[in-house]
């Protein structure tokens, strides 16, 4: 069994500077993604692309969405689109659905109640996305805990001036 980090998620580095945190508590060796053009992944379905177009420009302008975050953000958009679809399904069918019980000949012998499968799919996907993002530093809090040596150094206060 693996035990995760304890306590609340750490503050992103930029916020540490804004809040005046002590310099020895700020990771100035945080890796920085290259500033490159970001495009919508071709595999992303239309409803998720719509959400991408709505949110990505602002996130990219603020430096939150980088080339490193494309896959994670695409997964977020896809999950959000599936969530919207699931809400419609749950509204139409309910959180509990009737499922037929078949006898040995394949005829319906009755019905039983079960949780709507849309609920299960979304809960599993959300957990996977959270684990994936945390392991690879794909959120500002997680990224602030990473350190690299050599050419990845930068002055994080530069971000505050733009």
Image: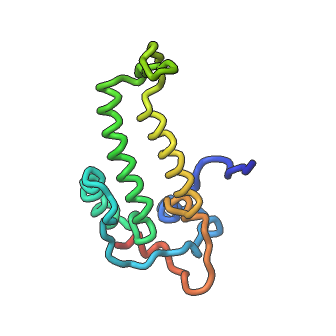
Question: Which residue in the rendered view is the most extreme toward the right?
Answer: 1
Q: Is residue 114 above or below residue 64?
A: above
Residue at image point 73% right, 51% down: 2
Residue at image point 25% right, 59% down: 53
Which of the pair 142/20 is nearer the observer? 142
Which of the pair 41/59 is nearer the observer? 41
Rendering quarter of residue 90: top left
Rendering quarter of residue 150: bottom right
Question: Which residue in the rendered view is the most extreme toward the bottom?
Answer: 151
Question: Which residue in the rendered view is the most extreme toward the top?
Answer: 110
Left or right: residue 22 versus residue 74 is right
Left or right: residue 24 versus residue 101 is right
Residue at image point 49% right, 73% down: 156
Q: x and y percent of residue 60 in the render?
A: 33, 66
Check the picture and name the quadrant holding the C terminus.
bottom left
Q: x and y percent of residue 18 in the render?
A: 47, 62
Rendering quarter of residue 88: top left
Q: x and y percent of residue 13 in the render?
A: 52, 64
Residue at image point 53% right, 61% down: 16
């Amino acid at each position: 069994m693996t035990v995760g980090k304890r306590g609340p998620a750490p503050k992103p580095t930029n916020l540490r500077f804004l809040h005046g945190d002590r310099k020895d508590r700020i990771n100035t060796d945080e890796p920085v993604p290259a500033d490159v053009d970001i495009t919508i992944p071709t595999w992303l379905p239309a409803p998720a692309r719509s959400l991408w177009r709505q949110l990505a420009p602002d996130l990219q302008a603020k430096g939150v969405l980088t080339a490193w975050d494309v896959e994670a953000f695409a997964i977020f958009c896809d999950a959000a689109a599936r969530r919207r679809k699931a809400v419609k399904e749950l509204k139409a069918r309910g959180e509990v659905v009737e499922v037929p019980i078949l006898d040995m000949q394949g005829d319906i012998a009755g019905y039983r109640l079960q949780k709507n499968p849309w609920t299960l799919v979304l809960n599993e996907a959300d957990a996977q996305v959270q684990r994936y993002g945390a392991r690879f530093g794909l959120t500002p809090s997680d990224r602030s805990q990473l350190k690299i040596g050599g050419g990845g150094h930068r002055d994080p206060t530069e971000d505050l001036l733009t």
